[in-house]
Image (tube, rainbow, N blue to C red):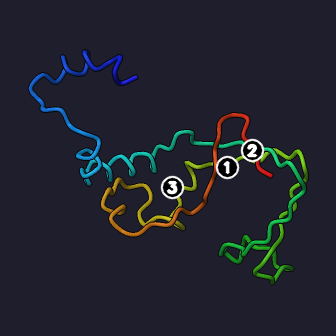
Amino acid sequence: MLGEYKPILDGATPDLPSISLEKMQKLLLVRMCLAESLRMYPQPPLLIRRALTDHTIKYRKATVKKSVSNKNDNSDEGELRIQRGTDIFLSIYNIHRSARFYDQPDRFIPRRWLQNYTAPIKLQSRGSDDQTG
């Protein structure tokens, strides 16, 4: 596709030297800005999956205010049962804006990508017909 638009791009930037993919990959600031932009404005911002089998997911409960928490439940762990055929909605936008995973999540800070980073959630997306299971 780039070849199709190369004359347009060349016309828009006639004085700039061509840049190879290898050189572009070394542009650390550009890469960090791109990663931070995609964190703040992920595409797609929402993923929808359908469970192919029944699942039970064990989890540790997030810290909540005592006034909101269930007073009868003193356990720090819980289970979530997902039945086959259940649609699951994942808000990537909200995950990427969570202080649980990112310091100052609402600020554009490209330098955060200088650190070793582990994604808060690993997803495999193969398009609109992708299913979890």
What SS does tag 2 mark?
strand
Looking at the picture, which amino acid does disc 1 mark?
Leu
Q: Residues within 10 Å of mark 1 (few under 14, many from 20)?
A: some
Q: What residue is at 53 percent from the left and 60 percent from the top?
A: 98
Which callout, 1 or 3, points to the residue nearer the camera? Answer: 1
Q: Seen in the image, is 85 located left or right of residue 110? A: right
Residue 77 point in image, percent of width and height: 78, 78
Looking at the picture, which amino acid does disc 3 mark?
Arg
Which callout, 1 or 2, points to the residue nearer the camera? Answer: 2
Q: What residue is at 73 percent from the left and 35 percent from the top?
A: 129
Check the image and report above or below for 21 versus 121: above
Whether pointer 1 and pointer 3 mark residues with C-beta atoms closer than 8 Å, the reply is no
Residue 27 point in image, percent of width and height: 24, 50
What SS does tag 3 mark?
loop
Of mark 1 and mark 2, the one earlier in the sequence is 2
- Considering depth in this image, is 107 or 29 the residue closer to the camera? 29
- Residue under label 3: 97
Check the image and report above or below for 10 versus 38: above
Residue 6 point in image, percent of width and height: 28, 20
Residue 70 point in image, percent of width and height: 81, 74
Of mark 3 and mark 2, the one earlier in the sequence is 2
- Residue under label 2: 49
Furthest toward the left, the residue is: 15
Whether pointer 1 and pointer 2 mark residues with C-beta atoms closer than 8 Å, the reply is yes
Q: How many dots with numbers? A: 3
- Residue under label 1: 90
Q: What residue is at 86 percent from the left and 56 percent from the top?
A: 82
Q: What residue is at 47 percent from the left and 43 percent from the top?
A: 41
Q: CA distance from mark 1 to mark 3?
A: 13 Å
Of mark 1 and mark 3, the one earlier in the sequence is 1
Check the image and report above or below for 44 versus 61: above
- Considering depth in this image, is 103 or 127 the residue closer to the camera? 127
